[in-house]
Every structure is written in C-alpha cells, then in structure tokens.
Image: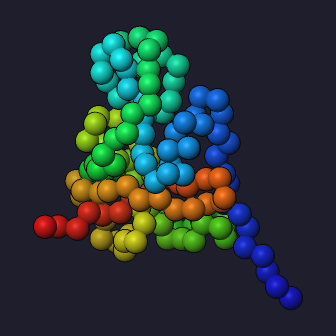
Amino acid sequence: MTTETPDKVLPQPSVLTEPYWEACRRGELTMQRCKDCQAYQFYPRTICSHCGGRDVAWSAVSGRGVIKSFTIVRRGISRAYEAPYVLALINLEEGPCMMSSLVDVDPETVVVGARVTVSFESWSTDIEMPVFKVAQEG
C-alpha cells in the first residue's frame, strides 16, 4: 500500500495579484509602489495604504529584511507541511512587513533581528512561493 503526500494549499492568483505571482515565477520579489508618495505596500491593494493614491504599480524589491517576529510550528496542518517549521514576520528594507516561511534553518536557532534574504520554493507548476533564508554573515 502506498501513501500519497497531500498537496500544499495553493494561493489562488486574481487579477490584482497575478503580477506578483508572475514575478515570483521569474524568481523576483515585487511589491506595489505608489507613484504619488513612493511608498511600498504589501499585500496588494487597488489604492495606496499610505496616502490613498490610486496610481500604484508593481516594482522589484531587494528581497532583504529582518525578522520582526516568528513562531515555530510544531504540528503542521497536514503531512504536506513537515514540522517543525518557522513562520516569520519579515520587515523588508523597503518598508512593508510580510509573513513567510524561513527555510534551511534549525528552528531553535532563529532569533528576532536576524537578517534574511528571499528565495523561492516551487509549490506547483504555476506557484513559486517566496520564502526566506537567514543571511550569511560577512
């Protein structure tokens, strides 16, 4: 008897978010940036969350940030999510904060304030999920 590994729950791209997922497929992290006040924002919206401007466009970001907070998940929601794993809030250099997984790290060594860089994991043929790795010193 064989046991199938369940699939991860996939995001459902919409008209608003498709440019984000398209950039992820290219290995590029993007965020919306207001053309009026120049502020970046994440998650995607139709108006600027800073000034209310309606002229927002997608812009590449560095993919570098700092861990603001994190939790160690010790029991995944299914076998598709092998525990333990780390979910973190990342303050990006450009300003926005995003939640993501930390990968390739011992969960017990993660600390608030650690520098991280974006990477991408293939979750399906259409979804490249942004994840973060602790940046190497030096």
Location of the C terminus (image quadrant) = bottom left
Where in the figure is residue 106, as x and y percent of width and height?
A: 37, 74
Camera-nearest residue between 1 and 35: 35
Residue positioned 34% across, 49% down in the render: 63
Residue positioned 72% across, 73% down in the render: 5
Protein image colouring = rainbow
Where in the figure is residue 121, as x and y percent of width and height?
A: 52, 62
Where in the figure is residue 69, as x and y percent of width and height?
A: 34, 50
Q: Is residue 114 above or below residue 60?
A: below
Quarter of the figure with residue 55: top left
Residue positioned 38% across, 26% down in the render: 33
Q: Is residue 5 above or below residue 41?
A: below
Q: Is residue 110 visible from the viewing direction of this image?
A: yes
Q: Is residue 112 above or below residue 45?
A: below
Number of labels in the image equals: 0
Camera-nearest residue between 26 and 117: 26
Q: Is residue 71 visible from the viewing direction of this image?
A: no
Where in the figure is residue 133, as x and y percent of width and height?
A: 35, 63
View extreme (left): residue: 138
Residue positioned 65% across, 67% down in the render: 80
Q: Is residue 5 above or below residue 135?
A: below
132 sits to left or right of 17: left
View extreme (front): residue: 26
Camera-nearest residue between 25 and 43: 25
Camera-nearest residue between 88 and 41: 41
Location of the N terminus (image quadrant) = bottom right
View extreme (bottom): residue: 1
